[in-house]
Image (cartoon, helix red, strand yellow):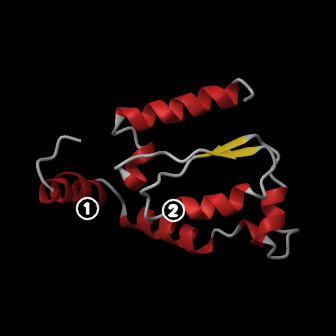
């Protein structure tokens, strides 16, 4: 990503991203969504998370990063068992949660390949 140190990254990227270019209310809304985003609470599922997953009809490729500490692959390994027509492809990366952000070309290539596969009907 072009940063010379962790400190340089934290100030140059992280602080710039969250302190100068984002409305704090957007971050609070994301946090609320992470804490309350249980698809089992969707009307008709009565809190049954697995039943809600089973109702997904779209072909899916679930792509967590192996180093993502926000959303670890183990969560998706469980979920994919219940989603029909889904596949788990773990992105092997050093970039953690940033694997899908377009900051590292090899990660982007893996994601692009999956999109092509999905659009071709895997």
Q: Does residue 10 lie above or below 4 as drawn?
A: below
Mark 1: few/some/many CA within 10 Å (<14, 14-19, 20+): few
Mark nearer the N terminus (1 vs 2): 1
Q: Name the residue nearer the viewer: 43 or 109.
A: 109
In the rendered image, residue 18, in percent from the top left (x then y), is placed at 30, 60
Mark 2: few/some/many CA within 10 Å (<14, 14-19, 20+): some
In the rendered image, residue 97, in percent from the top left (x then y), is placed at 42, 54
Question: What residue appears at the point 84 percent right and 68 percent down from the top-left corner?
Answer: 43
User: SS of the residue at dot 1?
Assistant: helix
Question: Can you identify the residue that label 1 sits on?
Answer: 19
Question: What residue appears at the point 79 percent right and 66 percent down from the top-left corner?
Answer: 50
Outermost residue, top direction? 120
Q: Are marks 1 and 2 in contact (CB under 8 Å)?
A: no
Q: Residue 116's image quarter?
A: top right
Question: Can you identify the residue that label 2 sits on?
Answer: 71
In the rendered image, residue 55, in percent from the top left (x then y), is placed at 85, 55
Question: What residue appears at the point 75 percent right and 57 percent down from the top-left corner?
Answer: 81
- Say left or right for 82 vs 93: right
Total residue callouts: 2
In the rendered image, residue 62, in percent from the top left (x then y), is placed at 62, 48
Q: Does residue 98 lie above or below 7 as drawn?
A: above
- Say left or right for 60 vs 101: right
Q: Quadrant of the N terminus?
A: top left
- Say left or right for 40 vs 107: right
């Amino acid at each position: 990503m072009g940063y010379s140190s962790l400190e340089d990254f934290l100030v140059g990227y992280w602080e710039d991203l969250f302190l100068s270019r984002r409305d704090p209310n957007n971050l609070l809304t994301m946090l609320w969504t992470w804490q309350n985003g249980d698809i089992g609470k969707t009307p008709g599922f009565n809190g049954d998370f697995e039943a809600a997953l089973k109702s997904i009809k779209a072909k899916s490729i679930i792509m967590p990063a192996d180093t993502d500490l926000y959303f670890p692959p183990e969560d998706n390994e469980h979920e994919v068992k219940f989603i029909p027509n889904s596949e788990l492809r773990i992105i092997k990366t050093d970039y953690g949660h940033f694997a899908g952000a377009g900051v590292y070309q090899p990660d982007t290539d893996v994601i692009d390949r999956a999109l092509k596969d999905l659009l071709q009907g895997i």
